[in-house]
Image (cartoon, rainbow, N blue to C red):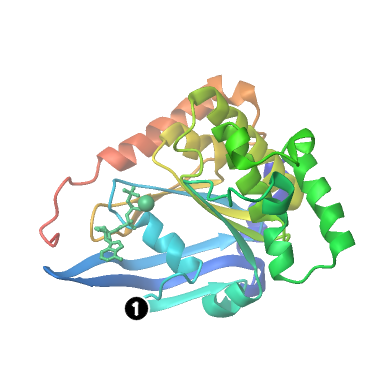
Amino acid sequence: MTLRQAHEPDRQAAADPATAVRATGVGKTFATRTGEVIALTGVDLAVAAGEFVSLIGPSGCGKSTLLRLIADLDAASTGTLEIFGKPAARARVDQDYGIAFQQAGLLPWRTVAANIALPLELHRVARGERQARVSELAELVGLSEFVDRYPDQLSGGMQQRVAIARALAARPRLLLMDEPFGALDEMTREYLQSELVRIAAETGAAVVFVTHSIPEAVFLSDRVVVMSPRPGRITTVVPTALGVRDEALRESPAYFERVTAVREALHGMPRTRADER
Ligand SMILES: Nc1ncnc2c1ncn2[C@@H]1O[C@H](COP(=O)(O)OP(=O)(O)OP(=O)(O)O)[C@@H](O)[C@H]1O
Ligand SMILES: [Mg+2]
């Protein structure tokens, strides 16, 4: 099954439980010593089940903030967030999503297998089932031969793959990823992009993916959400409609066309705003 087949447009219009993320009028204001910082304002976004959406925008435009609100790691100042039709706090308790951020964030004293097993332990999955699931996940990310290694014995790319396996452990229907490949070399990065596309298609998970890379956003996503400088808001949504994500795609005219569309959407925005603090 290709990623494209997993989310036909009609599924994007489905009712709430089929909508992985629904943000309505979401704003976030931080109180700081020098006054209030409006990080996000008026964000409306719906991510369909199984859909891959990237967030892109200049540094400080609120991408991580939005992801943290979706993950219920912080509370919105205005608006509502629903995850599969539930309040964000409930979705966190139900472990409806897995998280992978820029730093792999592995526990150095745990082996690869024990790192992947962590969410399963937290949810009291029985030992036998846990071991079977860890083997399955290690295979999915191509690390079957490394399960007994420790994180410092792995390359950065391998550590990221462990973090992705861990994020997938509890079979989340939603993956939240904040620049997970930011620190990797270009070849490893492209390899992991292809892996992620394959994994998302195989598991049917929706993905909200933050990146600074236009080509990465276009290669991975069904839609690229472009955000403005502070106060962060969504300015443009670029649907990619590129079909199968294989290596040939990276050199296709359609791909370059979407890269250009996203670049123009990003550069078309004003560098400073009257309402910026
Ligand atoms: N806890 C906080 N307290 C005060 N201000 C904050 C806090 N977290 C974020 N901000 C501010 O909110 C704005 C958005 O930050 P955020 O980290 O979401 O940006 P970003 O788009 O992820 O940037 P980058 O691309 O650099 O990661 C920034 O101006 C930041 O300084
Ligand atoms: Mg960020």
Residue 205 in sight: no
How many marks can you see? 1
Mark 1 surroundings: few (<14), some (14-19) or many (≥20) residues within 10 A: some
Image point 87% across, 53% down: which residue? 132
Image point 75% across, 41% down: which residue? 148
At mark 1, the secondary structure is strand
Image point 29% across, 54% down: which residue? 61
- Tell me which corner region of the image, top left, top right, bottom left or bottom right, holds residue 141: top right
Residue 256 in sight: yes
Residue extending farthest to the right is 128
For the N terminus, which image quadrant? top right
Ligand 1 sits in quadrant? bottom left
Is 190 situated left or right of 205 in this image? left
Is 91 situated left or right of 266 in this image? right
Image point 47% across, 46% down: which residue? 102
Residue extending farthest to the front is 109
Of residues 212 and 129, the one drawn nearer to the viewer in this rendering: 129
Is 212 situated left or right of 148 in this image? left
Q: Where 113 falls versus 36 (above or below)?
A: above
Q: Residue 159, how many percent across, how many down?
A: 59, 40
For the C terminus, which image quadrant? bottom left
User: What is the three-letter code of the residue carrying label 1?
Assistant: Thr
- Tell me which corner region of the image, top left, top right, bottom left or bottom right, holds residue 201: top right
Q: Residue 89, how many percent across, how many down?
A: 54, 78
Please name the residue that numbered disc 1 is placed on: 78
Of residues 184 and 177, the one drawn nearer to the viewer in this rendering: 184
Q: Residue 219, how many percent across, how many down?
A: 54, 34
Q: Residue 165, how many percent across, how many down?
A: 68, 48
Of residues 231 and 137, the one drawn nearer to the viewer in this rendering: 137
- Asked whether mark 1 lies closer than 8 Å to ligand 1, one says no
